[in-house]
């Protein structure tokens, strides 16, 4: 049928504008399950019983205008080319007209109908086309806690769902989920870790090509206590130096990105009265990035320097490191005789006599039995709760073992369970072997009543076997004073084992 014949058909149809049940209009794919997804091919078919001078035409829009006259489709349909996006063909002999629309978009969501001369019009079909959202997500915000993160974003017009996910920085896989709202919480994340989050807006038509997901990065909060400082050392060099600077590093904390909010540095003189100013110079509260502290001491003696790292989660955790230093009695280093240049002398050259050398005799001596271990200075064998405790064992001068060979153990009462050195260290007790000072030192930064008992250092190496034993009681003063001794410590064994 030519385009002219369609115009004649329209003219004749004006006199017979009524609906006919003999004209059937169908659409494929069906819209029974919802809108047609964009970029599909839609076929609208019109069927009628053929007859004399019955010509079919497809109409569009609220005014039921012929396809050939429509501003959106007319020019393309007039080409009558099946390769075009819009193509219409009609066979009046069999009573069938077919409209094909390829790659449909929301612009094709219009009203369509069929008109047959001498019969009337079919019922109309309104195409519903759904496209992916035209825009991506904006205002994507992450609010992390220790092991969770709350993600929020603005609602996207045309979106019915959002694909949101997280990924650990450096990882290959994403954890994603589809949600219908513009917010989501992820749980089970690692503390103090770096992550990336992303979100896409979509609907039944999917995600529009060319729109990238919104992304944001975040770091979960850190609830780990800090490590003790490393490399704690005394910088004194003179024999009688009393202004002492100690130094340390924060390498262990920096390697794991642990937060250090503050550093608490103290010094105590061994054997001094706690009330004596020289025993406890004022503690120093320092910033979390400080690595030195200077103390003015009262005079000769052995001093114990302690450095504790702190943050919001360090309470109840041993984060203290100690070092011991002796300020010696002498006022100056031992003198060395001056070196003098001898005056030149004139000697008479004589011919040396040739003598037979005497045989060398090597004296063989039996090895001496090493001395027993020296039990070092004892500090506060009855310390108050919350005070530091330090016990030392000193290597004798004539033995052939190092300070690391000395081991410590702990026992509650006479029948209580014994904890070895490994168990002590795991529980937080600090044990320092110093080959320079030839000593092994056990440190408890803040002792509690349940830590009373017998502490023993020992060495077992042929031909030597020796030990030092310290019985420690923890005294609480004030109203209702309590003293926990070895005899009463047995009753604390269950509590103590729970503590360690």
Image (spheres, helix red, strand yellow):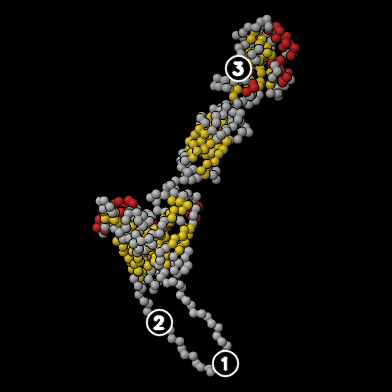
Q: At 59% from the left edge and 20% from the top edge, which residue is drawn?
A: 128
Q: In the rendered picture of this protein, how many numbered marks are placed on residues?
A: 3
**In the image: residue 369, left or right of residue 9:** left
Residue at mark 1 to residue at mark 3: CA–CA distance: 132 Å
Of callouts 2 and 3, which one flags the residue occurring earlier in the amino acid sequence? Answer: 3
Q: Give the label on residue 126, or none.
A: 3
Q: Nearer the viewer, residue 470 or 338?
A: 338
Residue at mark 2 to residue at mark 1: CA–CA distance: 40 Å
Of callouts 2 and 1, which one flags the residue occurring earlier in the amino acid sequence? Answer: 1
Q: At 63% from the left edge and 18% from the top edge, which residue is drawn?
A: 110
Residue 66, percent from left and from top: 69, 14
Residue 327, percent from left and from top: 42, 67
**Which residue has dot 2 on it?**
364
Residue 467, percent from left and from top: 33, 66
Query: In the structure shown, which secondary structural element does the residue marked by tag 1 occupy?
Result: loop
Query: In the structure shown, which secondary structural element does the residue marked by tag 3 occupy?
Result: strand
Q: At 40% from the left edge and 59% from the top edge, which residue is drawn?
A: 281
Query: In the structure shown, which secondary structural element does the residue marked by tag 2 occupy?
Result: loop
**In the image: residue 429, left or right of residue 336:** left
Residue 322: name its quadrant: bottom left
Q: Give the label on residue 347, or none.
A: 1
In contact (CB < 8 Å): disc 2 and disc 1: no
Residue 165 visible in the shown view: no
- In the rendered view of the protein, which quadrant contains the N terminus? top right
In the rendered view, would you say 327 is above or below 163?
below
């Amino acid at each position: 049928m030519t385009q002219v014949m369609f115009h004649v058909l329209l003219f004749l149809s004006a006199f017979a504008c009524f609906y006919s049940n003999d004209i059937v209009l169908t659409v494929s794919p069906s819209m029974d399950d919802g809108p047609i997804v964009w970029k599909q091919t839609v076929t609208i078919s019109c069927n009628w019983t053929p007859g004399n001078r019955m010509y079919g035409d497809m109409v569009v829009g609220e005014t039921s205008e012929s396809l050939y006259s429509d501003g959106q489709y007319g020019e393309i349909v007039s080409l009558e080319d099946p390769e075009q996006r819009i193509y219409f063909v009609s066979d009046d002999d069999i009573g069938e007209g077919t409209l094909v629309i390829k790659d449909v978009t929301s612009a094709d969501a219009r009203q369509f109908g069929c008109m047959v001369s001498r019969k009337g019009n079919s019922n109309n079909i309104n195409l519903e086309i759904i496209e992916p959202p035209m825009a991506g997500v904006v205002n994507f915000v992450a609010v992390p806690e220790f092991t969770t993160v709350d993600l929020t974003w603005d609602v996207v017009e045309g979106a019915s769902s959002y694909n949101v996910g997280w990924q650990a920085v450096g990882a290959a896989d994403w954890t994603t989920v589809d949600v219908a709202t513009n917010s989501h919480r992820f749980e089970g994340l690692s503390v103090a870790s770096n992550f990336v989050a992303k979100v896409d807006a979509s609907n039944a038509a999917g995600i529009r090509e060319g729109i990238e997901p919104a992304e944001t990065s975040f770091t979960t909060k850190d609830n780990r206590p800090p490590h003790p400082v490393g490399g704690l050392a005394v910088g004194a060099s003179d024999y009688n130096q009393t202004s002492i600077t100690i130094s340390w590093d924060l390498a262990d904390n920096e390697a794991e990105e642990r937060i250090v909010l503050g550093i608490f540095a103290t010094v105590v003189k061994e054997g001094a009265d706690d009330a004596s100013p020289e025993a406890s110079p004022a503690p120093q509260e320092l910033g979390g990035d400080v690595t030195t502290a200077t103390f003015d001491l009262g005079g000769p003696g052995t001093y114990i320097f302690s450095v504790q790292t702190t943050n919001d989660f360090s309470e109840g955790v041993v984060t203290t490191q100690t070092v011991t230093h002796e300020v010696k009695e002498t006022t100056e280093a031992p003198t060395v005789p001056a070196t003098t240049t001898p005056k030149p002398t004139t000697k008479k050259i004589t011919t040396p006599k040739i003598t037979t050398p005497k045989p060398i005799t090597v004296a063989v001596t039996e090895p001496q039995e090493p001395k027993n271990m020296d039990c070092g200075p004892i500090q506060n064998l009855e310390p108050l709760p919350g005070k530091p405790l330090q016990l030392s064992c000193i290597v004798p001068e004539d033995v052939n073992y190092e300070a690391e060979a000395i081991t410590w153990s702990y026992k509650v009462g006479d029948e209580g369970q014994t904890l070895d050195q490994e168990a002590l260290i795991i529980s937080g007790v600090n044990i320092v072997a110093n080959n320079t000072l030839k000593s092994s030192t056990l440190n408890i930064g803040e002792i509690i009543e349940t830590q009373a008992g017998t502490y023993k250092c020992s060495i077992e190496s042929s031909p030597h076997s020796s030990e030092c034993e310290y019985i420690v009681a923890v005294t609480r003063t004030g109203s209702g004073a309590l003293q926990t001794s070895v005899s009463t410590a047995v009753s604390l064994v269950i509590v103590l084992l729970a503590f360690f």
